[in-house]
Image (cartoon, grey):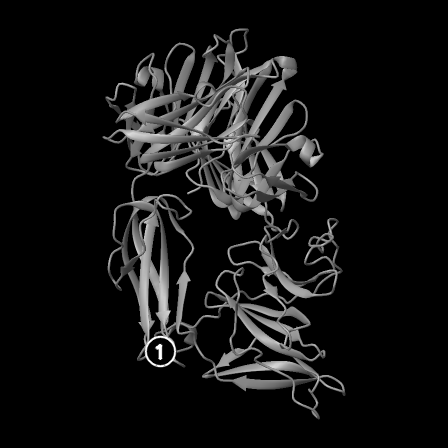
Amino acid sequence: MDDARYSSSYRTDTRSVPGTIRLSYLSNPFAKDSSNPVLAPGGAGAWDQGLAFGYPRTREGGGYEVLYRGADAGGTDAVGYAFSPDGIAWAKHPANPIILTGGVDSWNERAVGVNTLSFDGGIYKMVVLGEDALGHTSAGEYWSDNGLAWFINTTNPVLTRTMPPAWDDVGVSMNTPQLEGDTLRAFYIGIGHDAPAIGTATAAPFYNAIGNLVSSVFDAGSPAQWSTVTWDEAVPPGCAVEVRVRTGDVPVPDGSWSAWTPVADGAAVPGGPTRYLQYEVRLTGAGASTPEVSNLAIDFEAIPTTWYFAEGYTGAGFDKWISIQNPNPADANLTVTYFTPSGVPEPRAHTAPANSRYTIYVNHDLGPDLDNSFMVQSDQRVIVERPMYFRYSGWGGHDWRGGHDAMGSTQLSRRWYFAEGYTAEDFEEWLTVQNPNPEWAVIDVTYFVKGGDPIRKQHRVRPLSRYTIFVNQDAGPGLEVSVAVEADQPVLAERPMYFNYQGHIDGGHIVMGSPYLSQDWYLAEGATFDPFTEYITVQNPNPTPAAVALSYYRPDGAPITRNHNIPANSRYTINAGSDSGVASDLSAYLHSNLPILVERPMYFDMLYGGLPGGHCAKGVNSPSSDWYFGEGYTGPGFDEWLTVQNPGATAADLTVTYYVKDGTPIVRNRTVNPQSRDTINVKTDARENLEVSVHVHSDQPVICERPMYFFYQGYHVYNWPGGHDSQGFAP
């Protein structure tokens, strides 16, 4: 045959070259960052007052981390840990130092420092150089399963100097050992009275008798039925393997999760549908033998999405809508079930056309003059929001106009948290609770106040109903307050607020509660220039203070970093304009040493008082490659925007898809610079006069929000002007 590329008489497999073929590269001169040093020695009296020495590495799961050598004022060495999401803003771990020098006559009595750090098989391994009282150096090993709690190799030091006379009789410095068959090999620098030289050494490895690996939490994107667990294993005589699983409906495992349960290879995960799952592999070794587990897989089947909303009213002065994005190639058959104080659910059937935006006017769909909550059930994955517009009279007979919007929740929970809240004059705060269960729900509400002790109240919610709490009465007037709701049944909670900020900026905003706390929170939207006033509110329900590192991202320039200490069991407020010291569009990232909750209320007075209002959004706890929005409008009197935060070190290429009513989706592309905030004007990016929902896809993890400003009911003296914001939904 003339060309052997197309045929072979003896071989049917295919060989491929792994990786990407490209030219090699060298470095041009580096430009030092203007914020250097990004990790400095500690202040007076700190354990690392006199030194901060180490080389950061890329962190598993994103960001950077470093184990660094520090020294106090007396010259005593220790090792500490620090973390950064972007390489610029670093947070030192509050438990530092994590490795100390040894005792009298030990191999590391005088000094200790990190030489190498590696990650192998789910375990961090560190080679530490120690110096004894006479200045002789030796090498020891430490290990950790999380990078924070370190354990010493009981055979330390694993490599020492040779006794004189020898070429390495002063000290040794060893690299990370590598396993070659059944032998560990290390290379080391030997120091003696002549010039340093390189040597090699070998050792027989030994395995821990027992070890376990706990996975990260897996997110199905919506409630799912977890199916079979399978894996491959090699188990020598005397060894053992056990795999356990647990599931839950909140991303951080807590008391609502199931207990750890053993599963056999090929068996199903026990229990009903949940959104999150975590597994644990437990290994038992035998001397020089270790079991091995590979190719572990867990199957699951996604369930059609269900969305929940606690707030709603169809009385005079309120217009309530449901906005639905159906990005699927098939129509979505919907059941909207409304819950009212009567306890009698009222279902309605709808169909959202394929690849489109669909709108329901609840005042007509349900009827007038009803407090209500609702849930949307679909046979396709859809995105659901609830915009509301109002002329609010409220408890005090006001005339406050505006609108608010909330992305639905895809779950119920026994716990809900809110960071923002205010019960002073000209603010009216409410909690609305949906109980879709056939049993009564008992809810315990804890109010965390600035400068005071927590206030605790209890309420009972009728089955299959909506319930309302007036916080100004329940907690009391004149309070800066955050809230924790705990129930004996899975429920949903929202917090609408209406206000006349500073006596002339009227409006309202709303936030869907968060079912969990987190150490990391991102906020894509924010502005500190006139006519905006931006706040960041923090809830710390922990019994100890929380140390928070706050980074502000601008359209241009390096991030601005600040540090805050949040008192225990309290609510804390940051004025973003004063704190950042700039007048700019801003995004924010907060990292805490303890789980907290973060929200961002904003107030504005545009067009010389013609467009007053405010909006509020809770943070999201991680970037994502996909963000969805159900609501959007580019018609007369409405300005819609997308704000994008890119906290990473690489530019993000976006594909923005606009789903419109009765039309073909519109697709646009955009690039967002690293460590920056970007803003998209939807009216110009898509086009005017559209009912539109949005999907933002990025090749780098980002955060997206959608602020909107409006003259609802047109440009006249009786309109309802204001703004609202949605933090988007990330699967």
Q: In the rendering, at what x and y percent does residue 408 appear? A: 40, 32
> Is 511 placed left or right of 79 in the picture?
left
Tell me if I can see residue 686 in this picture: no
Residue sitting at the far front = 104
Quarter occupied by residue 186: bottom right
Q: Quadrant of the C terminus?
A: top left
Quarter occupied by residue 496: top left
> Is 435 placed left or right of 672 in the picture?
left
Q: Residue at x 47, y 12 (%)?
A: 392
Q: In the rendering, at what x and y percent does residue 583 appear? A: 70, 31
- Depth check: give the residue in front, 13 or 421: 421
Residue identifier under label 1: 11
- Depth check: give the residue in front, 564 or 295: 564
> Is 454 placed left or right of 330 in the picture?
right
Residue sitting at the far bottom = 165
Quarter occupied by residue 230: bottom left
Tell me if I can see residue 238 in this picture: yes
Q: Residue at x 27, y 64 (%)?
A: 265
- Depth check: give the residue in front, 534 or 285: 285
Q: Quadrant of the N terminus?
A: bottom left
Which amino acid type is marked by label 1? Arg
Q: In the rendering, at what x and y percent does residue 548 appear? A: 59, 43
> Is 673 placed left or right of 218 in the picture?
right
Where disc 1 sits, the SS reads: loop
98 over 632 or under it: above or below: below
- Depth check: give the residue in front, 542 or 606: 542
487 over 229 or under it: above or below: above
Q: In the rendering, at what x and y percent does residue 433 appear? A: 36, 27
User: How many numbered dots are placed on residues in this image?
Assistant: 1
Q: Residues within 10 Å of mark 1 (few under 14, many from 20)?
A: few
